[in-house]
């Protein structure tokens, strides 16, 4: 890639013709390689793979032809006030008499392509136990089943799996056979990783066995539109009378179906029908890298940190200029998705994600984000929702919060305990000894009482006995070679614990 980049950045009209030819050459070489790969495909998978590659070729074409970070900073404006509605305004409109009629026009789509490797787990992340032996998937099914039973409705659950998660997820779905939820699955596309130097796929065959696994990747959640459409599920749901999908990450435990937002969508006049709602929430210092909504060339648009020119990154991270960020909870019109797919009008910014493989080879993968499509939909808007609708579990620090008595669990939904006096969650930072879920669990005899906790930092070899209580700001640091055992029943309030602490039975 370095040769291409060098050639693309030189000025002058003489170079232009050369650049065009170079791009054509790269595109032709890629096309040739993809055809060679398809020739190795199993006949039953060849048609699916060809559809995947059609999408990949479009991305690769745009990657070669679009230069720069993609936004002109001078054209960025704050969104008009009416384009981002406060949740309270939408809630104040109340609910219709017939809630079931609205729910019957909805399907819930959960993005389920990720593995639990960052938390030291094998298999899909959605199968990690997060609360009372329930996995992310268990809680999702319970939430939707509760809705269907309460309102006598028929909201289906749709899982967008990846080739990494599909087999394991399908095996587990057997256990929900007798739940009152119809569950559908479809697969994200499978794209080839690209060698950074040659700009060609590193795959030599379509196989996905472990020896070839590194050659492929699922191309980000922006792929939901194409793969949902290609799977036939989009047309099937429309035929069943569904009008909207609620899309969210399966690891966001705050992303439950909100009846007030649904009612807002359903009650718009037909000619002003809102086709896309993005839930946003107020930024804190922990969210400075999150994508934000801007007004750009008369459209509402999602601005991600990867698109920001380097000179403006600090400005982008400012909590004062960009006050909100995208939760990735999205409400999207199915008819609009079909229209935009058919007319090839979904223009998603490309995210170039560089990777170094185990053998040291530098590759990159081309991805897109689902929220980036907001600019393509009619009457799109943001809704500024409470922080409680953004409760992602990305790390063991997040896991500690959702397992604690800060939250109560009811019908699959987590809500902040009424006994906590302030609405924000404590800031928790657990060290590398807690990264893997199994190790994390082995360090707690049970989860401490955290109702009055503001801040917790734990570093080093630390364990917690039963019924420990943490209040205010607690910092526990075991230096290298030392170990700290917090004894059963201990109450730590505004304490720093360091050094070595072991209480042994004799």
Image: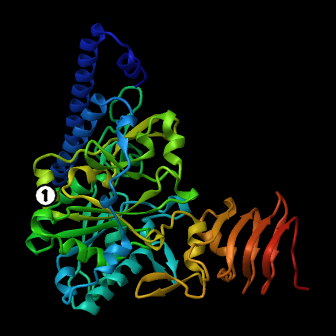
Look at the image and tell me in which quarter the N terminus lies.
top left
Q: Where is residue 189 in the image (x, y as percent from the top left)?
A: 27, 52
Observer-nearest residue: 309 or 470?
A: 309
Q: Is residue 386 above or below residue 32?
A: below
Q: In the visual, does 348 lie left or right of 77?
A: left
View extreme (front): residue: 81
Observer-nearest residue: 250 or 337?
A: 337
For the residue labelled by badge 1, is the local secondary structure a helix, a strand or a loop? Answer: helix
- Residue visible at 70% across and 69% down in the picture: 456
Q: In the visual, does 161 lie left or right of 243?
A: right
Q: Is residue 121 above or below residue 375?
A: below
Does residue 358 appear in this view?
no
Residue 436 falls in image quadrant: bottom right
Q: Where is residue 478 in the image (x, y as percent from the top left)?
A: 81, 63
- Residue visible at 20% across and 69% down in the picture: 244
Does residue 267 appear in this view?
yes
Q: In the visual, does 172 lie left or right of 400?
A: left
Count the numbered circles shown.
1
Look at the image and tell me in which quarter the C terminus lies.
bottom right
Q: Position of residue 450 (x, y in %)?
A: 66, 80
Residue 467 falls in image quadrant: bottom right
Where is mark 1, residue-wise?
A: 338
View extreme (right): residue: 506
């Amino acid at each position: 890639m370095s040769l291409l980049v060098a050639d693309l950045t030189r000025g002058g009209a003489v170079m232009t013709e050369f650049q065009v030819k170079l791009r054509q050459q790269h595109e032709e070489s890629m096309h040739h390689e993809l055809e060679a790969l398809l020739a190795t495909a199993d006949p039953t998978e060849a048609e699916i793979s060809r559809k995947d590659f059609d999408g990949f070729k479009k991305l690769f074409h745009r990657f070669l032809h679009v230069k720069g970070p993609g936004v002109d900073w001078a054209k960025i404006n704050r969104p008009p006030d009416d384009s981002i509605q406060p949740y309270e305004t939408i809630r104040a409109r109340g609910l219709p008499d017939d809630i079931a009629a609205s729910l019957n026009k909805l399907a819930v789509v959960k993005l389920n392509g990720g593995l639990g490797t960052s938390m030291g787990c094998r298999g899909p992340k959605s199968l990690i136990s997060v609360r009372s032996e329930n996995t992310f998937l268990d809680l999702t099914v319970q939430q939707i089943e509760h809705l269907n039973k309460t309102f006598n409705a028929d909201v289906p659950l749709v899982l967008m799996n990846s080739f990494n998660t599909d087999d394991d997820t399908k095996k587990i779905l057997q256990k929900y056979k007798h739940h009152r939820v119809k569950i559908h699955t479809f697969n994200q596309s499978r794209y080839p990783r690209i060698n950074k130097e040659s700009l060609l796929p590193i795959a030599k065959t379509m196989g996905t066995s472990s020896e070839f696994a590194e050659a492929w990747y699922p191309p980000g959640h922006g792929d939901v539109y194409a793969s949902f459409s290609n799977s036939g599920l989009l047309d099937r749901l429309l035929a069943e009378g569904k009008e909207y999908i609620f899309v969210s990450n399966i690891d966001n435990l705050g992303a439950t179906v909100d009846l007030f937002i649904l009612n807002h969508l359903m009650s718009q006049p037909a000619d002003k029908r809102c086709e896309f709602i993005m839930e946003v929430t107020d930024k804190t210092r922990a969210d400075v890298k999150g994508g934000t909504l801007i007004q750009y060339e008369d459209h509402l648009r999602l601005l991600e940190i990867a698109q920001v020119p380097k000179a403006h990154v600090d400005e982008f991270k400012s909590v004062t200029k960009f006050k909100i960020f995208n939760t990735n909870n999205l409400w999207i019109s199915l008819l609009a998705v079909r229209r935009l797919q058919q007319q090839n009008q979904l223009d998603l910014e490309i995210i170039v994600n560089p990777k170094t493989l185990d053998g040291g080879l530098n590759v990159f993968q081309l991805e897109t984000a689902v929220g980036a499509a907001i600019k393509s939909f009619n009457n799109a808007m943001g809704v500024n929702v409470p922080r409680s609708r953004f409760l992602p579990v990305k790390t063991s620090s997040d896991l500690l919060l959702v397992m604690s008595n800060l939250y109560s669990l009811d019908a699959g939904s987590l809500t902040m305990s009424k006994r906590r006096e302030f609405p924000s969650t404590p800031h928790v930072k657990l060290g590398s000894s807690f990264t893997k879920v199994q190790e994390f669990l082995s360090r707690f005899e049970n989860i401490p009482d955290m109702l009055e906790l503001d801040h917790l930092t734990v570093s080093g070899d630390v364990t917690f006995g039963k019924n420990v209580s943490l209040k205010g700001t607690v910092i526990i640091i075991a230096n290298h070679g030392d170990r700290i055992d917090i004894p059963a029943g201990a109450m730590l309030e505004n304490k720093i614990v360091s050094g070595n602490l072991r209480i042994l039975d004799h």
